[in-house]
Image (cartoon, rainbow, N blue to C red):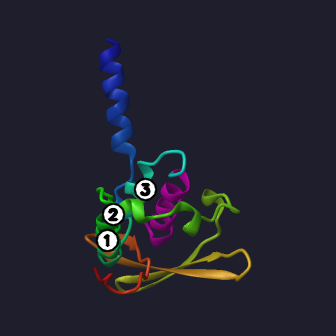
Amino acid sequence: MSRTLVSLFLFLCVACAPDPGQLSPNEALRAFLTALDRSPHAPEQLKVAYDWLDTRSQTALKQRAELAASLAGRSIAAWDMLVAGRGSFSAYSVPSLRMRSRIEGERAFVTIPGEAQGEVEIPLVREQGRWRVVLGLAGEVRQ
């Protein structure tokens, strides 16, 4: 009986989770920032944050991880190149961030309040049926 209840509970939790393709640019950015902010205490959240990135950002991080791995002599995952402290909005509660977005076709721009520099505009792109965060990393890393 208890096994059935647990199975039913887990099914309902999964069934209620929103489809990433149905999230707005604001919600996609919020999911990315939440995963990044949780990562110091839950390192697996870096992979979740990585999954919210666009293809170009993921490729750039893979290249950086390969270079770092060749220098360190050990394997390094691409998502380990994300650093929570650099992209964190820890001065704010991520759920309460005031966000505005504008959508231009397959691109979106989400504006959030910054600490000293005023507002910050974060670009997103629609890929594979959902909004993804664009990090805007510099070109290819040369080995």
- Disc 3 or 1, which lies upstream in sequence? 3
Is residue 30 on the magenta stretch? yes
Q: Which residue is mark 2?
A: 78
Q: Magenta segment, principal secondary structure? A: helix
Q: CA distance from mark 1 to mark 2?
A: 10 Å
Earlier-in-chain disc, 1 versus 2? 1
Is residue 34 on the magenta stretch?
Answer: yes
Secondary structure, mark 3, is helix
Q: Is residue 139 left or right of residue 112?
A: left
Residue that lies at the very extreme toward the left in this rendered image: 128
Q: Which residue is mark 3?
A: 46
The magenta stretch spans which residues? 23-38
Viewer-side residue, 39 vs 51:
39
| Crowdedness near tag 1: few (<14), some (14–19) or many (≥20) residues, C-alpha within 10 Å | some
The local crowd at label 3, few if under 14, some if 14 to 19, many if 20 or more residues have their Cα within 10 Å, is: many
- Give me the disc on residue 12: none
Q: Position of residue 90 (x, y in %)?
A: 65, 60
Residue 15, percent from left and from top: 33, 43
Q: Earlier in the sequence, mark 2 or mark 3?
A: 3
Foreground label between 1 and 2: 1
